[in-house]
Image (tube, rainbow, N blue to C red):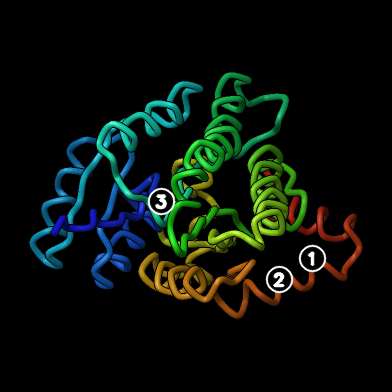
C-alpha cells in the first residue's frame, strides 16, 4: 500500500519574528514546514532546531521575495518537489518610516512588491494546490496600521490596508471551497520591525505595548484553525481598531502623525 504524502505549511518571512514563532507553533502541532526567507544561515539553523525538537519535516528555500520573479520561483519549488500544501502563511513584509516625498522611490516600490504583489501572487499560484485538500488555510499578515492612514508610514499602512481588504474579499469568494482565509493584524511586536523601518526613536514608547512573537503566533495559529476572518492579538490592539472604526478619520490621522512624527 502506497503511503499518502505528508502535507506542509508554507511560511514566508520564516527566519525571524512572527514567521519564526509561527514555525514553532505549527511544529509543536506536528505540522511539516516549508520555510521561505532570504537568510540561508538562519533558515538552516531553524530547520535543524525544528527537526530535532519536534520530529517534523522541514524544507527551506532562500530567496528574496521582494522581486517580481520570486513568487513563481516559490511555486516552481513546491511543484518540482510535489509538496502537498494545506497551509499558506504570507508573513513576509516590512515598513519604511519617513515622509513619502523624501524616501527613495525604489525602496518604497520594493516594499509594495513584497507586502502586496508577492502576497497576491502566492495566493493565486498556490490556491489550486490548497483547494485539492479536504481542508486548507491561508493566513495573510497585515497590521493594526491597516485600519487607518498613518502619515510617515503612508505606504506601509496602505499596503497593509490592501492585505486586509484583499483577504476579506478572497475569504468571501472561497466560502464554499475547502480553503479558509484569515487575516492577522498585530500591533507592536518585539521583532525588530521598528529598527528596520527607521523608527528607533519609537522603540521606547512601543516597548510598553509590545507583544512577544510567540504570543502573537499562538493566537494567530489558533485563529487560523478556528477559521476566523480577522485575528487581532491583544486587548489594547482590539480597542484601538474599534476606535479607528468609530472616530473621525481626521482625528485619527492627526493622532497618528503625532506619534510617528519625523
Q: Around disc 2, counting alpha carbons within 10 Å, would you say few (fewer than 14), some (14 to 19), or many (20 or more)?
A: few
In the displayed image of the protein, which residue is found farthest to the bottom?
Answer: 235
* Circle 1 residue: 244
Give the position of the N terminus as an image quadrant: bottom left
**In the depicted view, which residue is nearer to us: 183 or 241?**
183
Direction from residue 219 to residue 254 in the image, left or right: right
Asked if the residue at tag 1 contacts the one at tag 2, i.e. Cβ–Cβ closer than 8 Å, the answer is yes
Residue 135: image location, x then y, percent: 46, 64
In this picture, is 69 found above or below 248? above
Number of on-image labels: 3
Marker disc for residue 192: 3
Of the 4 image quadrants, the one containing the C terminus is top right
**Quarter of image, res 172:** bottom right
**In the image, residue 227 above or below residue 191:** below
Q: Name which residue lies at 87% across and 70% down.
A: 246
**Crowd rating for badge 3 (residues with CA inside 10 Å; few <14, some 14–19, many 20+):** few
Query: How far is mark 3 from mark 2, CA to CA?
Result: 22 Å
Amino acid at each position: 500500500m502506497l503511503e499518502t504524502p505528508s502535507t506542509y505549511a508554507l511560511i514566508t518571512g520564516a527566519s525571524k519574528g512572527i514567521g519564526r514563532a509561527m514555525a514553532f507553533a505549527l511544529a509543536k502541532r506536528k505540522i511539516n514546514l516549508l520555510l521561505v526567507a532570504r537568510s540561508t544561515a538562519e533558515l538552516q539553523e531553524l530547520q535543524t532546531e525544528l527537526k530535532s525538537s519536534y520530529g517534523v519535516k522541514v524544507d527551506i528555500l532562500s530567496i528574496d521575495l521582494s522581486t517580481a520573479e520570486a513568487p513563481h520561483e516559490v511555486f516552481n519549488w513546491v511543484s518540482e518537489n510535489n509538496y502537498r500544501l494545506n497551509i499558506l502563511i504570507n508573513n513576509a513584509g516590512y515598513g519604511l518610516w519617513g515622509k513619502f516625498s523624501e524616501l527613495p522611490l525604489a525602496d518604497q516600490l520594493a516594499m509594495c512588491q513584497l507586502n502586496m504583489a508577492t502576497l497576491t501572487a502566492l495566493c493565486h499560484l498556490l490556491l489550486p494546490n490548497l483547494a485539492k485538500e479536504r481542508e486548507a488555510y491561508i493566513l495573510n499578515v497585515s497590521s493594526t496600521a491597516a485600519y487607518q492612514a498613518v502619515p510617515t508610514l503612508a505606504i506601509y499602512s496602505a499596503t497593509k490596508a490592501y492585505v486586509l481588504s484583499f483577504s476579506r474579499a478572497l475569504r468571501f469568494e472561497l466560502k464554499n471551497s475547502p480553503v479558509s482565509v484569515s487575516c492577522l493584524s498585530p500591533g507592536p511586536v518585539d521583532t525588530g520591525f521598528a529598527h528596520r523601518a527607521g523608527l528607533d526613536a519609537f522603540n521606547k514608547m512601543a516597548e510598553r505595548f509590545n507583544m512577544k512573537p510567540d504570543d502573537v503566533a499562538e493566537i494567530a495559529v489558533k485563529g487560523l484553525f478556528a477559521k476566523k476572518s480577522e485575528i487581532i492579538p491583544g486587548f489594547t490592539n482590539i480597542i484601538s481598531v474599534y476606535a479607528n472604526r468609530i472616530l473621525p478619520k481626521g482625528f485619527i490621522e492627526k493622532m497618528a502623525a503625532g506619534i510617528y512624527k519625523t
